[in-house]
Structure formats: C-alpha cells, structure tokens
Image (cartoon, helix red, strand yellow):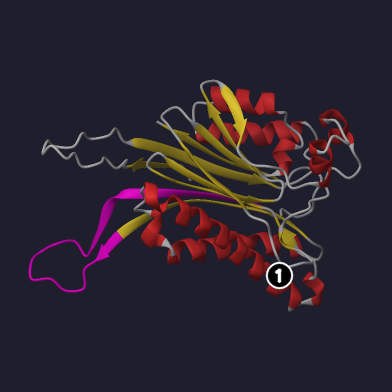
Amino acid sequence: MTQTTPLAQPSPMPTNGALPEVAPRLTVRSFGLTDRGRQRRLNEDQFVTASLMRALWVQQSSMPQPPVQYADDRGQVFIVADGMGGHRGGEQASALAVGAVEQFLLNALRWLIDLDGSAEGSVLREFKAAIESADACVYAAAAANSELAGMGSTLTMAFSSGSDLFVAHAGDSRCYLARHGKLQRLTHDDTLVNELVETGVLTPEEASRHQFRSVITNVVGSTQKGVRAEVHRMTVEAGDILLLCTDGVTGMVSDERIAAVLLNSVSPQTACEELIRLANDAGGNDNITAVVAQYA
C-alpha cells in the first residue's frame, strides 16, 4: 500500500521573542513488494511499511469532540527480513523477527515521535535493543522446537521522523539512499566473503563468484544467541529515495541498475515492480523483496 504522510520538522524557539520560522514539511510516499522468485518453493522474506503517530483517545468529555485525535507528527517505519532454516523455519524466523520489532516500536512510541538532538544516543540504543529483542525471540522459538533448530533471519529497518533517519541492521539485506543522482549503501553486509574482501584476501570481483558468498556471519536467531546490531543516524532531505531490500534483489541486480531504477521511477510502486522484474529476469534465484520510500 502506498502511503503519503507529512513529516513535521521541529523548529527551535527563538530567544528574541519573534515567532519561530516554520520549517518546510517533508512528505514521504512508500511502497513494498515481495515475490517468491523463480527458484524457491516458499517465500521466506517479510516486509513492513508503517506509520507511527500519537493519538488522543477521548473517554469522557463535557464538550463535543472527536473520540480520537491524532497529532500532526508521524514517524515512518520500514522493515525487510530474509529468513533461513529448514521445514518452514526461515518463513517463521523472519515473521517472528519482524513481529518482535513491531511490538518493541509500539512500546517505545513515546520517544520515536518526539526526537531532538539530545535524544539521538538513546534512540540508537533503543534500535539496537529492538534487534536484540528480535534475536532473543527467534532464538527462543528455535530452542523450543527441534524442527526449527538453527532458524534465523536478516533484519534491516529504517525509521524516519522529520529529517531524522535511523537505520538498524543485521545480515546481508541492505539499505540504500539515492541522493543527487548517486546511490549510497547505508549498511554493511555481514557475510564471510565481505569480511575476506575487507581484509584484502579477496577482491570484490572474486567475492561475487565465491562459493561461500551466501554464508552470513551475523543474523537474528540462528544457532547462537547474541546478534551484533549495526545502528546509525543520518539526515534525509527532499528528493531523497530510500531502498530496503533482500539479497534476492542485490544478488541479481547491480548497484548501477538499482540506482537507475530508483532515479527514473515515477513512484515507489513502479520502482519496486521494476526491481522485482529485473531480479526475476536475471534468474530469480532467491526470494525478492523491496521497500522504496520517496521524500519530497
């Protein structure tokens, strides 16, 4: 479902008594799409696009007013997860991971909507805790059912409120930002071959063909509890395009083609549809999921 939501940007109160300048509002349109691909029997990917908002539920009042009132400020949440594990374990792992993060965000709503500079550190800590909560949830479910032993999931999530963007990540699903015609990867692949590239053992070209390129070294759940969550903050601006996707996209479509799709698509929906078409045309070797958000 496509969403168009105004995101308020806070303006500091001046000290000279003048009225504060009203900062321009960012709007965001988002869309998510997932596809089984052409080689897999099940789709073990999951995605979420959601709005978080403050609401006033009126129980009693001496004056006429709506029973529910919503604040103008909203936050946008985007999540992708790629499950792994036999006997439908991957499907369950990704669903559990996403569900755990959703519940965490609902309980943390008080700070998600009202951000300021002093809150940045606590927000990053809370997002790290959200991924750790998902890790504990998936690990516990696997430990309780021998048929699900070892199941795990990648998890990449982004939260934006006003011009603030927070990204949290574990695994090899990715988050990209397209700005001024250039594509920037915001996440780091937690894979064996990527570690070998970073240490100089392999070149990027060798890594793309390596037999162990699918070995992930850090996921939510799996055989050992204790995920390493990557979290960071940046600023978004009008014209930015955000992409979250699983390796069903990045394993089939080059960064150059991804950038072209994001920059030339008229809407998040057409961008998602084109990315999935390109991945399937290239072989569709894995489940394919993309979430695109356009800021204006």
Would residue 175 be found to the left or right of residue 69 on screen?
right
Across and down, in percent, residue 267 comes to 49, 31
Across and down, in percent, residue 249 comes to 70, 38
Q: Which residue is mark 1?
A: 139
Q: Amino acid at mark 1?
A: Tyr
| Farthest-out residue, left | 63
Across and down, in percent, residue 173 comes to 68, 45
Query: What span is colored magenta in the figure?
Result: 55-81
| Residue pictured at 74% horizontal, 55% vertical | 218
- The one nearer the camera, 72 or 38, is 72
- The one nearer the camera, 235 or 200, is 200
Q: Quadrant of residue 194?
A: top right
Across and down, in percent, residue 201 comes to 88, 36
283 shown above or below 72 = above
Residue 73 included in the magenta stretch of the image: yes
Task: Give the overall secondary structure of the magenta segment.
Answer: strand
| Farthest-out residue, front | 15
